[in-house]
Image (spheres, rainbow, N blue to C red):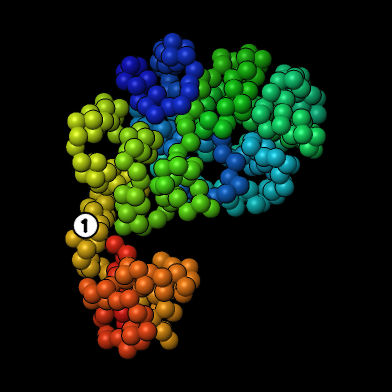
Amino acid sequence: MDIENTIKIMLKGAADYTDVKEIEEKLKKVEAEGRPMRIKLGLDPSAPDIHLGHAVVLRKIKQLQDLGHEVIIIIGDFTGMIGDPTGKSKTRKALTREQVRQNAETYQQQIFKILDKNKTTVRYNSEWLDKLNFKDVIELCSKCTVARILERDDFQKRYNNNQAIALHEFFYPIMQAYDSVAIKADLEMGGTDQTFNVLMGRNIQKDYGQDSQITLFMPLLEGIDGVEKMSKSLGNYIGVNEDANTMYEKVMKIPDNMIIKYYNLCTDVHPDDVAKVEARLANGENPRNIKMELAKEITRLYHNEEEAENAEVHFTTAFQKQEAPEDIEEIKFETSILDTLLKTGKCESKGELKRLFEQGAIKVDGEKVTDFKVLNDLKQDTIIQIGKGSFYKIIL
């Protein structure tokens, strides 16, 4: 094991982590024992649609997996029935085990677009939590004080505001911590919003006579607006299941000041090479060129080389040259041009479409048209352009 290189890759883009000396000691210990490091990631799949923000931790795990370490994904089918109270201002509605299992199936289909399925072990924490009797639960709870639990920001706020905290919610971080004991985790990863839960596992392992896991926390990723956390509800997300053209186009929308962060959190590019990209930006190279390299790099991770190259050609043609691409989408003419263009999904209402016409943002066969009323007698294969890069061929 090249420990120095492993630590360099591990810490790329990380927001917080165990002391580097302790990380080094852990790596030396597992190497001396002739085994890979056991990396734990716990998932509470209450929302099964993954975007690049969710994928930040998974990308880091994939990088360590490629270095030969063992990845154990723990699906919280037992803890998911409680629901992670992190950041919640009230008790969450419990999911049934069947709901959690269904979400987990969808989740796995997506995470294996990132992780190597053949090198990943998936466990359900009901395997061990179902077997605990009440005596075991009391013993587990004795490892943690109420004062420690109330250190959690969300619990503290609810307690101070006289908002209800159900007793079973206290069990969530304790049970998640016990997962680390059950699999003898060497490293647990999570987002910065999981700091309390992950550190709890580190402490409880010690109580059960195990070596404490090291920890690694990845920052939250801003969406393509560069301001708010990536979120589907805010519309600033890049989904891992989106087609190559859409993914490439969305990456190109991120602000220039987010390029390096996206390189660090959304790609597997080595830290030394990211430093070279940073130097190119500092030396005045056009950020657009570098962003195109980033868009291609991200797109090929979720598709393949050919699709990434085609997406680049599509973007160059549609957005830079403002020409209709060869694989132009066809739409069937409806009762009016407004009804037809609404089907593209580019606008939510006819009123929004009318405003785009008035602003000169819509072209017909390359010519701006400001009055939509003249377009109800279109010819076959008329090309409609909405904005800078969205082209559609009208089929009568």
Where does residue 245 sit, x and y in percent of width and height? 31, 57
Where does residue 68 sit, x and y in percent of width and height? 37, 27
Q: How many marks?
A: 1
Left or right: residue 76 versus residue 333 is right
Residue drawn 39% across and 29% down?
13
Among the 4 quarters of the image, the one containing residue 69: top left
Above or below: residue 296 compared with residue 60: below
Task: Give the crowd class for mark 1: few <14, some 14-19, many >=20 residues within 10 Å.
Answer: few
Above or below: residue 342 compared with residue 125: below
Identify which residue, 82 or 295, lies in the foreground: 295
Query: Which image quarter holds the N terminus?
Result: top left
> Can residue 186 be seen here?
no
Q: Residue furthest bottom?
A: 377
Query: Which image quarter holds the C terminus?
Result: bottom left
Above or below: residue 234 compared with residue 379: above
Where does residue 163 sit, x and y in percent of width and height? 78, 37
Identify which residue, 229 or 165, lies in the foreground: 229
Could you tell me which secondary element the residue under label 1 belongs to? helix
> Can residue 224 be seen here?
yes
Residue drawn 24% across and 45% down?
288
Residue drawn 46% across and 26% down?
15
Where does residue 379 sit, x and y in percent of width and height? 27, 86
Amino acid found under the numbered disc labelled 1:
Gln
Q: Which residue is mark 1?
A: 320
Left or right: residue 2 versus residue 104 is left
Residue drawn 38% across and 69% down?
356
Left or right: residue 389 versus residue 235 is left
Among the 4 quarters of the image, the one containing residue 176: top right
